[in-house]
Image: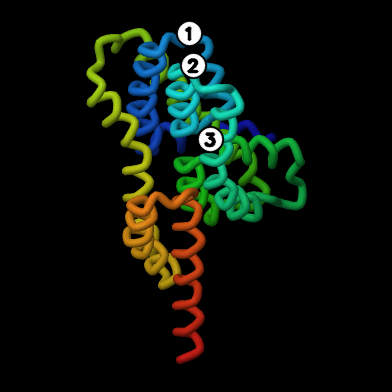
Amino acid sequence: MPEATFQGGLKAAWTSVFAYVLFGTYVGLGALALDFGFSVQWLTLSTIFVWAAPAQVIIISGLGGGASLIEVALAVTLSAVRLLPMVVALLPVVRGPRTRTWQLLLIAHFTAISMWVESLRLLPTMPREQRAAFCIGLGTGLISAAVIGGLVGFYLTAGLPVVLAAGLLFLTPLSFLVSVARNSRTLVERTAFGLGFVIAPLLAAYKIELDLLWTGIVGGTLGFAAHRLREAMR
């Protein structure tokens, strides 16, 4: 794996706004883990291996609230379904003729909202043979920001108010929302993005299970249908 390209990914991670969003998010997560009695070692390992703040919130609140391991595992699995389309969209962009399987597996693990958005923004301008190493560096840098933020939250913000901790946890979805809005250029993207604001609250109001998944399916399908209809009319 080219060292210079890997270091370029690290630099891109730490010059991205997402690194600081993740840092702030995990400050709140570190304070939450401390409040529920989890150790700093547990927090660090869960960040490295789970690598998804919403899933970690489910684990911490679930186990801390007395839920069984099976219940928590099922909830985490359902929350992780949203990442599968991101992996499916990203890997064909990364894969090159000499890309190794272990690199693709590592990139799939690193794929989260922040890494996915930055990869799709930066990779198209790079030679294909450099993309895997760059993505691994990018993912390593972003996960490092999360680990450091978690340590700061655990050790330095023991008295962090609950409202502030919750607000910090909201930084990641808010930044994702802004990034998607900025990068939505085609009719498919804009239609699906706008429909999400309508469909998601309705499903949540009627307590439809897997509301996030259904929002993506319905919004994406209607957006694609609108695109095909416009092409047919042309």
Mark closer to the observer (2, 3): 3
Q: Please report the residue visible at 66 percent of the width from the left and 35 percent of the height from the top.
A: 106
The picture places residue 57, in percent across and down from the top left corner, at 43, 27
Q: Secondary structure at mark 1?
A: loop
Q: Which residue type carries mark 3? A: Ala
Residue at 56 percent of width and 29 percent of height:
71
Q: Amino acid at mark 2?
A: Leu
Q: Which residue is mark 1?
A: 39
Q: Is residue 234 visible?
A: no
Spatial distance from mark 1 to mark 3, Cα to Cα? 22 Å
Look at mark 2 in the image and give the residue it sits on.
43
Give SS at disc 3: helix
* In this picture, residue 155 sits left or right of residue 134: left
Q: Position of residue 24 (x, y in %)?
A: 33, 27
Marks 2/1: CA–CA distance: 6 Å
Q: Quadrant of the N terminus?
A: top right
User: Up-down: is 61 above or below 226?
Assistant: above
